[in-house]
Image (spheres, coloured by chain):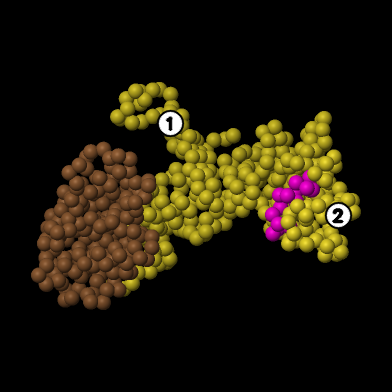
Chain colours: A brown, B yellow
Amino acid sequence: MSLLKPFSKLPGLNTANILLVESEEQFQQSLADALVEETAVSVYVRLAKSLPLPKENEESRPRLDLVVFIINMTSELSFHSAVASLKHLDPGYFLGKVCFMVTNARSASVPTERLDAVRKLVASLHCPLIFAEDQTPDGVTNATERLLTILKVAAGLVPMATALYLSNLTRCTVPPDIDQPSFD
Amino acid sequence: MDDPVKRLLQRLIRRIPSQMLKITLDKWGRLTATQQRSMDFTQPKRVLTEKLLSIYEENEWTVKHVTELEMIYIMDNPNQGMWNAYQLMDPEDDSQSVNLMQFKEQFKSHLGEIVRHVSVKMKKHTDEAVWIRIAWGDGFSRSNHLKPTYVVHQLQTPYVFVTSLTSKQKPLLSQALILATRHQNIKDANLSGLKLTAIRELLMRQYQQVFPTKYHSPLTEKTQTVLNTQTEREQAESAANRCQMACEAFGDGMLPQLQSAVYKLETKFRDPANKTMTEREEPFRCVVKFASTNLLESLRQCASSGIASTPVTPLLSSIPLKGKNYFVVTDNGPGSSQK
């Protein structure tokens, strides 16, 4: 099974490459437009619906510094697609080069079990979990800023900070009473 | 209101929205210049109705005039009420040479023979289709103009579109139609919708169709949003394939607006996990209905976004292919029932 490997290619000078994986292919487009506007670093964005990525692009694909899984909380399909894609990532990525972004978490139609399941999954992988709002330009800007912070560290462009160090600080944790019934 | 014609006129005015009222009345052309000038279309509907009812008294309009106005309104706004499509079968040798006059005479005489007190009005639309308005009566009562049936037929095509037809009236209309168009049979085309234009476009395939091609590029450029130079899609090819197959199944551009698709299942229950149901001999009867404001557009999006697997299953692609939205699915494969 071909896994996406983190260190099999050489990095570029002052560049950062990010892969956005989203089953619905909506938010990733507005994020991509906002991400490339960064001036301090050249950001190159790759968009995918799911992993594995097609073999044909293997040669031309640059080294991916950060893989972001975007999950729409209102869709069970989105969650399952992200979980299925995880299998195609080399374990080396999980040392700070994977991030999860979740949209529509505040929506009333989201069952609490799904949010708990996402948190447990992300905590077990020691990755950061970002809650984003995708409908307004402000929401997109905020999400972009947070992604850029993590991306710059993951690409090695921030002195004295490594991806593993940052992920230890920012990783998702679950409260010990997550399995207790909540008072709704 | 004891005058039924007056009541009919009042109901009709109430039905026509204010924006359409001036246009429809002008098209009808039965108001004199002074009367036209006296109509102030900025006033509320109630006032306009009063005015028109007084003009009705003045001009001594009859039921013929009022039904004429109704027909003009419906012909220009056909997308209301539920339309059903029927198909004429087994044409006789001279069916292709039936001309308009012949059709009109034959239809009126045949229908008049079968139904007493029927009032038939026929008009040719600009697109060569014949519109028929039928007010049904029976042996005991005069024609009921409050519930007319409208029939649209384009001569030399096998399709007939009907709205507001009861099951009692259906065999009578069918008989008159097959005799007038020189066919031997008429059957239900299993297609219904709120918009006449949509079901007609679907049956006559008047929407943009896509044929299998090796080079997809025109379609990809149109549907996928333009990305900046620093962004790239990894799975662009598979996305383009999905889009191509979705468009091949459903068409490109604006699709005819269907509101629902109904599948009546008469297949055996199959689920390895549920033994009690699977062991039953009789088929599991179930009806599945898909509803949407624009069903074909929704299905096309499902296929191109990957929610529905591609190549598109024949159950869904038969909707535009066969021009039907009612299917009976048996264990031998999808088919359509003859009603």
What is the crowding at mark 1: few (fewer than 14 residues within 10 Å), some, or many (at least 20)? some
Q: Outermost residue, left direction? A: A160
Q: Relative to B151, is A18 on the left or the right?
A: left
Using a 10 Å C-alpha cutoff, classify the residue at mark 2 as few (fewer than 14 neighbours), some (14 to 19) or many (20 or more): some
The answer to whether dots 2 and 1 both sit on one chain is yes
For discs 2 and 1, the disc positioned in front in the rendered view: 2
Residue A84 seen? no
Do residues under tags 2 and 1 come within 8 Å of each other at their CB atoms? no
Q: Is residue A83 above or below residue B214?
A: above
Secondary structure of the residue carrying numbered label 1: strand
Residue lying at 32% horizontally and 67% vertically, measured from the top left: A141
The picture places residue A180, in percent across and down from the top left corner, at 23, 38
Residue numbers of the magenta segment: B8-21
Q: Amino acid at mark 2?
A: Ile
Tell me the SS state at disc 2.
helix
Query: Which dot marks residue A138?
Result: none
What residue did someone put label 1 on? Answer: B267
Which residue occupies the foreground of this view, B4 or B67? B4
